[in-house]
Image: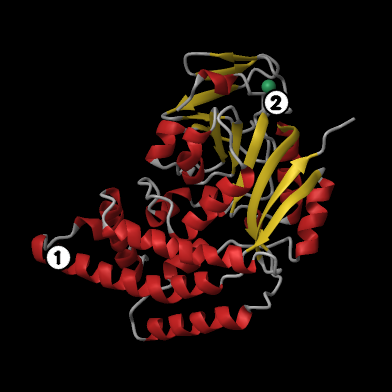
Amino acid sequence: MIPYDLYRLLQCPTCGARDLFVTDAGVHCAGCHNDYPRHAGYLDLMPRAVEFDYVSKYVTEEEELSEELDYRELAPPLLAAGVRNRALVRMLGLRPGDIALDNGCGTAKFAAWNADKVGLMVGSDPATLFADAAVEQVALTKADSRCLPFADNSFDKAFSLDVLEHFPRDVIDAYLAETARVLRPGGRFFVMSNTSDPSSLQPLTDASRKLGRLLVRAGLYDFQREARRKSDHIKALRTWQDVLDAMQRAGLRPVRIVFWNSVFTSFVEHVLMKLGEAALGRRTANRKLRTEPDVTQSSVLSPQSSEGTHREIRARQRMRDRLERRGPAFYALTAVTLLMELDLWLFGALKSGSYCMVVEKRVER
Ligand SMILES: [Zn+2]
């Protein structure tokens, strides 16, 4: 979706000019004469003639990842994504008049889930693996977070989930500085990420992990897909103090902090869900084999995807269909989501690697 209101926020990502003209094909900059094309559902506002050392693997391996990440259909916000989304809504306090930015939006699921809560929801990411629902509801831009294509003080709110841990430190500094630049003074920014800080509740988390590994050894579950998802975590901000320092450098003042010690979460993810997905995936696989001997779905996926990955994607597809109907599965998963969220309520003040925080751009006097 490219609403008119989006154009009013834009500035040229290459030269910084605000003299941009809407053309039939997209946007033209009067300053540097670059054109930024409009594609199906998003504007390409990548800076021109700029070479960066660091490029996310989500950009370089976009095509290969797109099939594995299974991104186009959006499930309701449940489980870990549900806990994240509820924390985002509760801590950031989105209002009907807000102009909000999902900075590094990925599929833009968080933007899509909350688009109806604000006046304008904008999503920005260098990779364009956008979910269909996001294309419908979110003003999407292909952009680099080191030179955002938005004017100073454009946004009331911004958010960033599972982004910072992917960047090297100089990129984090540029990312935070740009986020601060496009926020209005007093504007708020919700960040969820993780450091390498240990949690004092780690033994409890480990117990679930061990149990989960037993399931793997028993052949019930395959972690390959999960490993791939986490494969470019750098965690350049290694400690919580590093996070606070980086925010301060960007002129962002912490307002609220909640740590996520994954005690209940780890049990749910490593044990409960693995069992559930394995059971669902198998049943789906058996049914498919009986009805369609030549399964096209498998051949769509690259050969290096393991059977476990196929099984998990099948399980997810099947689960999405059920959740659409708001049946017992939906309510069961909602209950599990709330169980995971207990981690935030009970242990939110205990420092751990995973954190949610809200920071505020300083008001200049
Ligand atoms: Zn320009």
Q: Quadrant of residue 197?
A: bottom right
Using the image, tell me which numbered label, if any, was put on residue 52: none
Q: Residue at x 44, y 32 (%)?
A: 137
Q: Position of residue 142 (x, y in %)?
A: 54, 35
**Quick one: which residue is furthest to the left in this view?**
291
Q: Find ligand 1 in the image and state its quadrant.
A: top right
Q: Residue at x 49, y 68 (%)?
A: 227
Which is more toward the observer, 331 or 226?
A: 331
Coloration mode: secondary structure
Image quadrant occupied by the N terminus: top left
Disc 1 is placed on an element classified as: helix
Using the image, tell me which numbered label, if any, was put on residue 151: 2
- Give left or right: position of 254 versus 64: right
Q: Earlier in the sequence, mark 2 or mark 1?
A: 2
Mark 1 highlights which residue? 287
Reply above or below: 256 against 21. below
Residue type, mark 2 in image: Ala
